Structures are given as C-alpha cells and as structure tokens.
Image (tube, helix red, strand yellow):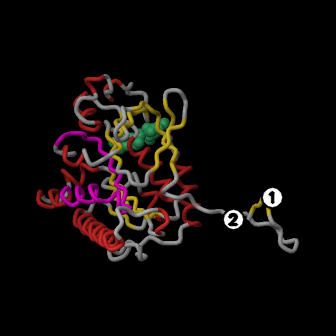
Amino acid sequence: MFNRRGPRRTGGATPTIPVSGLSIYDPMHFGIDENGRQVRVRLAYKNIIAGGEPGSGKSSLVNTIVAHGALSTDCRLWLFDGKQVELDPWRPVADVFVGNDMERALYRLAQLQHELDIRYAMLRKAGRRKITRDDGLDVILFVIDELALFSATYGTKEQREDFIRILRDIVARGRAAGIITVAATQRPSADIIPTSLRDLFGYRVAFRCTTDSSSDIILSVGWAGEGYSAKTIDPLSVGVGWLLAEGGIPQRFKAAYLTDADIRAIVAHARSIRTHYPDDDGTAGVPALVTV
Ligand SMILES: Nc1ncnc2c1ncn2[C@@H]1O[C@H](COP(=O)(O)OP(=O)(O)OP(=O)(O)O)[C@@H](O)[C@H]1O
C-alpha cells in the first residue's frame, strides 16, 4: 500500500504493491480524434453499435471494449461470437461464451432477460431508477460480434425473430439495470439492424461503409447528407470511423488497437485479478445478486 512517503514497509519485508483491476464505471480509451486528443467513453449506462464493411476495424474496437471489461473486476463478460474466432482469445475470462449455436444463443439471451427482470424487481422494491457503482452488483458486458449471423443467418426464421425481440428488450431496459450491450455488424442494412433496434443504441460507430445509406443505417438517417458519411473514409484507413454519442454530432476518430500479443497479455492479467470463472456448461454464469 502506498502513502505519501512511498510504500509502507512491514518488519523489513519486501514491500508489496497491490494490483487492482479497473472498474467498468471508469472511462475507457477508445482512440484518438483528428487533433490527436484522447477519445474516452464511459461504458456504464451505454449501448454501443459498430458497423462497417469487412476489414474496417469493428472487431478490433470490440476487442478493446472487451479488454476494458475483462480488466474490470466489477464486470461480467457475456460474449456471443458468431464467427467463433474474433472473441475466442477472451474465452478464459468470459463468464458466458456462445459460438455459432442459435439454440444456445437463445437460451442465454432468455437467461439474460430473466436477470434483467430480477434487477428491475430489485430496483422497484428499493424505489430506485438505476443500478449504481455503490450497489456492488456486477455490470454485465454483453457483446455480439457479428449481429447479422444471429439476426439473419443462423437458425430458423422464428428463432431469428425471437433473437431480435429479446435483444430489443435487453438493449431497451439494460442500461439502468447494469447490462451494457455492444454489437458489431459488417452488414449495416435495415433487415439486420431494424431502426427500432438501432435507435436504442445511444452510441454508434460507423467504420468505412460502401454507401451513404449504410452509413446512415448505423449513425441514423440524415447524417450522410450533412457530410458525416463513413463512405468518405479511405479504404486504407482501417480503424478510422465516426463516433456518434447520444445527442451529439459525429466525431471522426481512430480506434485504439490491440495486437494478438497485447490481448494474450491482458487475458493472462485479467485471469489473475478476476474472482469469477468461466462456466461453459450452459447452466451457470448468471451473477450472484446482492440486495440493493
Ligand atoms: N484501429 C486499428 N488500427 C490499426 N489497424 C487496425 C485497426 N483496426 C483494425 N486494424 C487492422 O485491420 C484488420 C481488420 O480489422 P477487423 O478484424 O477489426 O475488421 P472487421 O471490420 O471486424 O472485419 P470483419 O467484418 O471481416 O470481421 C485487423 O486485423 C488489423 O490488422
């Protein structure tokens, strides 16, 4: 432990420096803006959607977000990775990991919705509007990379409709209950991201898109016409995108980037500081609740 005079020594023993994790309530480093200034985002109480053409930098941003969650000791990681390779390195620290199995995805989604109901019941009972940092209740970072695989590719039509329906509820009610949804898609079109779903994401990131309309699907209609279009991003400028935060105007930024080696190092460190462990048997992973 440190005080103003430096590490406290006990009986001549080697001083120890406590290593603690981050908090999901702390702002995270998203990247830099056009003036080289740091762009920071506080994940708590947010839902984030990122879209753009293949190879534009979505998964890299999602990895950076997951890294902050993994290093936050007050955050549970629920990862849905339809491609099974993008988020796989985080599996050792994920509380829930779902691959390309639609039935399992729906099972977990329903479980998350149930958790949401429990949290709302707790809030109601306590006469409160939202979970706060002082509640000691873990935030759940729910990440879906590639949304289109669950909303338009895997499973039956009914299953895909169920997926979107439950997801819409989780995104709509999750923020107050400490459930953050982050979704990425390389197919920004109305059938993949219905407007009713897109509008629930307060934070939107448009990486390079091939058309103005795809860019508008992510940011919302009208921005391309005002000069904020991800079509204008140079195809070689991987990781450059427009970030639209609730109520603001889009801000051009370059996303932070973690190499595979960085991710391996972060996972190793996260394993050493996280007190809960992954469970992949389909029955656990729902956090223990504390009374508000
Ligand atoms: N912010 C960044 N800075 C530097 N390089 C980046 C950045 N983001 C991505 N890259 C490079 O671009 C490659 C593709 O990025 P990424 O996998 O994130 O794209 P994507 O949009 O998720 O693609 P897909 O839709 O095909 O999954 C990365 O492997 C990396 O080499």
Name which quarter of the figure residue 96 lies in.
bottom left
Residue under numbered circle 1: 6
Badge 2 local density, few (<14 within 10 Å), some, or many (20+)?
Answer: few
Q: Which tag is nearer the camera, tag 2 or tag 1?
A: 1
Tell me whether the residue at label 2 lies in contact with that at label 1, contact meaning CB atoms closer than 8 angstroms.
no
User: Is residue 285 toward the left or the right of residue 4 in the image?
Assistant: left
Q: With respect to residue 291, does 91 lie above or below?
A: above
Q: Which residues are magenta?
A: 164-190
Any part of residue 288 in sight: no
Q: Residue at x 35, y 75 (%)?
A: 281
Q: Is residue 155 magenta?
A: no
For label 2, the SS is: loop
Residue under numbered circle 2: 18
User: Is residue 102 toward the left or the right of residue 265 in the image?
Assistant: left
Q: With respect to residue 103, does 161 lie above or below?
A: above
Q: Residue at x 38, y 61 (%)?
A: 178
Would the CB of label 1 be found within 8 Å of ligand 1? no
Q: Amino acid at mark 1?
A: Gly
